[in-house]
Image (cartoon, rainbow, N blue to C red):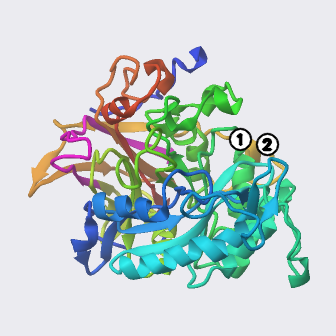
Amino acid sequence: MKRNHRLTVFSLVSTMAFCLVTGSLAFANSNSNVSKDGKWVAGDFHNHTYLTDGSKTEADVLNHAFTQYGLDWFTNSEHGGAFSRDANGSQFTMDTPNALLSTDSKYYLWRWATLKDYSYPIIQAARKQYNDKILLQGLEWNVPTHEHASVGIAADEPTAISKFEYIFDQNDKDTSRASEGLTKDNTTAQSAVDGAKWLEDNYPDSSYFVLAHPSRQQKYSIADIRDFNNAAPDVAFGFEGLPGHQKEANRGGFGNNFGSNTYKARTYGGADYMIAKVGGLWDALLGEGRHFWNFVNSDFHNEAGDFWPGEYCKTYSLLKGDDPKSVVASLRSGNSFAVHGDLINALDFSISSKNNVAVMGQDLEVEKGDNAQITIRFKSPEVNNNGDKPVVSHIDLIAGDVTGKAQPGTDEYTKDTNESSKVIASFDSKSWKKDNGWNVIVYNLKNVEKNQYFRLRGTNLAPNTLNETDAEGNPLVDSLMGDNNENKAYADLWFYSNPIFIQSK
């Protein structure tokens, strides 16, 4: 079934990056999937333990992530600021080195110190225990004047991430390291851009800055995101378009508890409005040709509101190498997709023209007027972690025009819509063929005349599912289902691919 008309995606909202790869395959528990192109791996880079506001030890979180749910890599990424518990959940005391007594009569340590002296040693030891996995030390950055972001630096020492937190984290008020020549820069919107630029200048090929739950408090505008990406294109390359907290009553942790009543501060099929809205903010960024990617993480704190890392949320990406720096390069490539509830565990999405092929995250050059062919191959597992057999109802092919980057100071720079973006085709089981266990879709693009991008989303829900999807199969706001829970999350599954760009020459 082909669609050429503009969709009205949210009719009810008012009521409430690296080399060419051909034939890439992706699998859950993908360590066995080794090919000449590398291997597809699944990971998580936003989670919490006792050291900040989580309720488990790092050992417990890693055991679930690696042993029970089969992740291949993991980044510990917890809040900056100051916290009162050690890695086992015990309160710091007056005898804890460098502990500070606060007004609530608890002893606290600044996060820069616990990163260096508590968290990193645990990660370092875990690397020996899980020697077939890849671990990074990260931070959930309190971005000055904004909200949160996941930051990771691939390093064999904790100095870099500790220094970054001390200088740039909005909640770190410590000034004790001035004697080291470290100057605080954590109070203004420019501080946020400075932090991104610091990563770009010092760790351009080994760090990332990914916005967390970006619409939750409405503290990230598209101009902010453009500023970050302009200042640090190799580092500020994505966001959590699929936020964690997927078991919380307010799905994704979005809701009135953060003081924002706008329809944009809600989830739609578990997705942030920035990506769920066709023609919305993500499409506006892609319409500039920006290599800006979507990811998913657990944001695990506790079992009540969160799934364990790897249990429900997975970011799959193609990995070349076996070290932390390779993970960063894999995320930066954009050759990745994000999925809930193991709706799919393998995706091969490519566009070809003549003898040239591009995959997710890449640009395909096509001679003006030539034809191109889109190929979509996917698999679903026999069973997911809820004991269900996930079945894809339909996959949407979304396209939009690429017109070039907006310039700071112009009206276009603050515009967060892309009117050219639309669902150009929707495929159900009648549209795909079986090929050795794969579901295969082929879609032809004739007479390519302009620069465009193409992305995918898929779901287990049919169009017109009550309170879940509209007549076109687009997700409705999750609050229509009432309080969310684990069963509702598993009944409403989606995946999103990263885009492929076509440059018509």
Give the percent coordinates (x, y) of residue 501: 47, 58
Q: Is residue 159 above or below residue 353?
A: below
Amino acid type of disc 1?
A: Lys
Image height of 131 relative to 466, above or below: below
| Up/down of 422 relative to 75, above or below | above
Q: Residue at x 75, y 60 (%)?
A: 108
Name the residue located 69 percent from the left edge and 68 percent from the top edge: 232
Q: Is residue 68 left or right of residue 367?
A: left
Tell me what residue is drawn at x 37 percent, y 55 percent. 310
Q: Which mark is residue 411?
A: 2
Residue denoted by label 1: 415
**Magenta-drawn segment:** 375-401
In the foreground, 305 or 473: 305
User: Quadrant of the image for the N terminus?
Assistant: top left
Q: Are marks 2 and 1 in contact (CB under 8 Å)?
A: yes
Characterize the local packing of mark 2: few (<14), some (14-19) or many (20 or more) Cα atoms within 10 angstroms. Answer: few
